[in-house]
Image (spheres, rainbow, N blue to C red):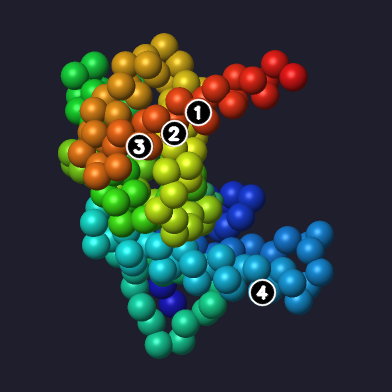
Amino acid sequence: MVKQKLICQGAEARIILAEKTIIKDRIKKSYRIPELDKKIRISRTKLEKKLLKKASKVINCPSIIESKEEDPMKIKMQYLKGKKLSEHLENLSPKEQKEVCKKIGEAIAKLHDSSIIHGDLTTSNMILVDKKVYFIDFGLGFISARYEDKAVDLHLLKQALEAKHFKKWETLFKAVLKGYSKSKTFKQVLQRLKIVEKRGRYKSKT
Ligand SMILES: Nc1ncnc2c1ncn2[C@@H]1O[C@H](COP(=O)(O)OP(=O)(O)O)[C@@H](O)[C@H]1O
Ligand SMILES: [Mg+2]
């Protein structure tokens, strides 16, 4: 039996480390009707796996480990031995921080150009391995080519930067956009982002 260690217990999943493998196990929500709960967990797991596979063709993310006895509620993937960006970004020099953010923007451009919306772009879902940024947690992701969905994806990252790395968030987000400018639909998404943000400001006043 391989030694297993629980490394994270979130609201949605338990993350178990077993040697060089991560097992993401979607947990039961007892407030849901059991049959429905099972269906939701299976479909979310299936979608996350599909998105991870699709994303790994264009950006850095953990590779999926296929096994014969597949559990429909578990994803087995490569363990990334690195540093979570939410904990490490502040330790980098200002120049390195901007470089990392530009790389993040470039990766989002590639995801969006493949119609992949991450759905939870925060620095807690990014791991720095050497100088490469890996994206994890496609648990809220979906497939869409709409400018609106891409703009909201970016907006969530902006908010996350503001919340976690408050002092420098503007500089950091600027660097993200510099990287993102490589996207085929950069102009259209940026235009949409302005609309999304106006809506947000209007809403917060009411
Ligand atoms: N492949 C991986 N390699 C290393 N750490 C991981 C990996 N997948 C998840 N983790 C760790 O577990 C945490 C939670 O995983 P995540 O997929 O983001 O689940 P949740 O949906 O609960 O946020 C991550 O923030 C990260 O610290
Ligand atoms: Mg997460």
Q: N-terminal of the two: label 3 or label 4?
A: 4
**Real-space CA distance between mark 3 and mark 4, rounded to the nearest whole angstrom:** 36 Å
Report the amino acid beneath label 1. Answer: Ile
Q: Counting other residues with Cα less than 10 Å from the Cα at mark 3, is it few (<14), some (14-19), or many (20 or more)?
A: some
- In which quadrant will I find the C terminus? top right
Discs 3, 2 touching: Cβ within 8 Å: yes
Report the amino acid beneath label 4. Answer: Lys
**Residue occupied by mark 3:** 188
Question: Could you tell me which secondary element the residue under label 4 belongs to?
Answer: helix
Position of 77 compared to 99: left or right?
right
Q: Nearer the viewer, residue 5 or 145?
A: 145
**Real-space CA distance between mark 3 and mark 2, rounded to the nearest whole angstrom:** 6 Å
Q: Which mark is residue 39?
A: 4
Q: Counting other residues with Cα less than 10 Å from the Cα at mark 1, is it few (<14), some (14-19), or many (20 or more)?
A: few
Q: Nearer the viewer, residue 134 or 25?
A: 134
Question: Could you tell me which secondary element the residue under label 2 belongs to?
Answer: helix
Q: Nearer the viewer, residue 73 or 113?
A: 113
- In which quadrant will I find the N terminus? bottom left
**Residue occupied by mark 2:** 192
